[in-house]
């Protein structure tokens, strides 16, 4: 399933945040959006997921305009995870992830739905916390629970806003390992906003640089993670080590 962003712009009042964004993501492709704070990464994710209404342009999924989808159908296409839980609520981890099955159930939860929830809990290393209250979890555990909930929706597109921001190094790697494996196994397209260029390099099929709300560059890690591009976007000097499987960024200093 292909998702396509066509000439998308967005503004808050008179403040232009996104300008003429064109983007196409294929089945099972993992795309990382990188760029400085305020570049428009989170806003673009929210426009794709219909949380925000673009000022102009369209988002299409297999040629169908997403603004024409009803809420339940849209929830079967998009799984969205914000940077952190905005509100905590009195529910167990199991029930929190079970909420991801809402687009498929009414009043009765089938054994199949429960099995899907258990599978997601295991994949996100949360099965031992299934009966804990969500609001008792650490920030990183809450983040993993929210990603498990999004995956329980069985979405066609997974939208992640800084998915590793509250995680330690081991759980960053474990989470992205899981996300990429599920993406490839099930053909789920992944679009994620990332600050860590080395994580983007290691886990992405394609990297998109945003600068001041515009698409600066798009390509493979090898094509995009070049010192001149990073200098242009971040105004810092770096070395890029290409001896490993993917480019590795070593900061030198502020330009």
Image (cartoon, helix red, strand yellow):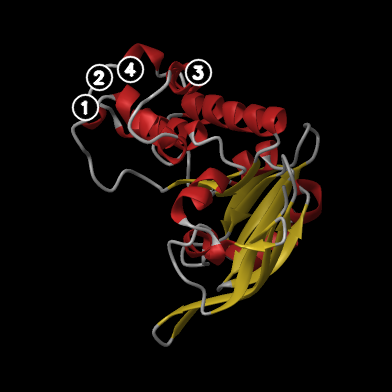
Checking the image for residue 136, the label placed there is 1
| Occupied quadrant, residue 22 | bottom right
- Mark 1 and mark 3: Cα distance apart in space: 22 Å
Q: Nearer the viewer, mark 1 or mark 4?
A: 4
Residue 62, horizontal then vertical, whole percent: 72, 55
Label 4 sits on residue: 130
* Dot in front, 1 or 3: 3
Mark 4 vs 3, N-terminal side: 3
Instruction: Tell me if residue 15 comes above or below residue 66 in the rendering.
Output: below
Q: Helix, strand or loop at disc 1?
A: helix
Q: Indicate which label's residue lies in the foreground, 3 or 2.
A: 3
Circles 4 and 2: CB distance less than 8 Å? yes
Distance between mark 4 and mark 2 Cα atoms: 6 Å
Residue at 22 percent of width and 39 percent of height: 88
The answer for how far apart the CA atoms under marks 3 and 2 are is 17 Å
Tag 2 or tag 3, which sits nearer the N-term? 3
| Furthest residue toward bottom | 14
Residue 119: image tag = 3
Asked if marks 4 and 3 touch (Cβ < 8 Å), the reply is no
The residue where tag 2 is placed is 132
In the shown orientation, is residue 94 left or right of residue 154? Answer: left
For discs 2 and 1, the disc positioned in front in the rendered view? 2
As displayed, is residue 234 above or below residue 184?
A: below
């Amino acid at each position: 399933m292909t998702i396509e962003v066509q000439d998308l712009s967005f503004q808050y009042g008179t403040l232009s945040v996104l300008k003429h964004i064109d983007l196409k993501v294929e089945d099972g492709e993992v795309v990382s959006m990188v760029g400085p704070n305020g570049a428009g990464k989170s806003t673009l994710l929210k426009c794709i997921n219909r949380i925000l209404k673009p000022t102009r342009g369209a988002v299409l999924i297999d040629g169908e305009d997403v603004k024409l989808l009803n809420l339940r159908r849209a929830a079967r296409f998009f799984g969205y995870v914000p940077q952190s839980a905005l509100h905590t609520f009195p529910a167990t981890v199991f029930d929190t992830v079970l909420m991801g099955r809402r687009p498929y159930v009414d009043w009765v939860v089938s054994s199949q739905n429960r099995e899907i929830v258990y599978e997601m809990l295991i994949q996100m290393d949360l099965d031992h916390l299934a009966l804990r209250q969500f609001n008792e979890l650490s920030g990183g555990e809450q983040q993993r629970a929210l990603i498990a909930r999004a995956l329980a929706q069985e979405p066609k597109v997974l939208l992640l806003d800084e998915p590793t921001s509250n995680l330690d190094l081991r759980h960053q790697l474990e989470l992205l390992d899981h996300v990429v494996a599920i993406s490839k196994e099930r053909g789920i397209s992944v679009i994620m906003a990332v600050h860590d260029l080395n994580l983007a390099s290691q886990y992405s099929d394609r990297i998109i640089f945003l600068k001041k709300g515009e698409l600066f560059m798009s390509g493979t890690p090898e094509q995009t993670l070049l010192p001149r591009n990073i200098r242009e976007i971040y105004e810092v000097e770096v070395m890029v080590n290409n001896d490993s499987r993917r480019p590795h960024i070593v900061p030198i200093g502020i330009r």
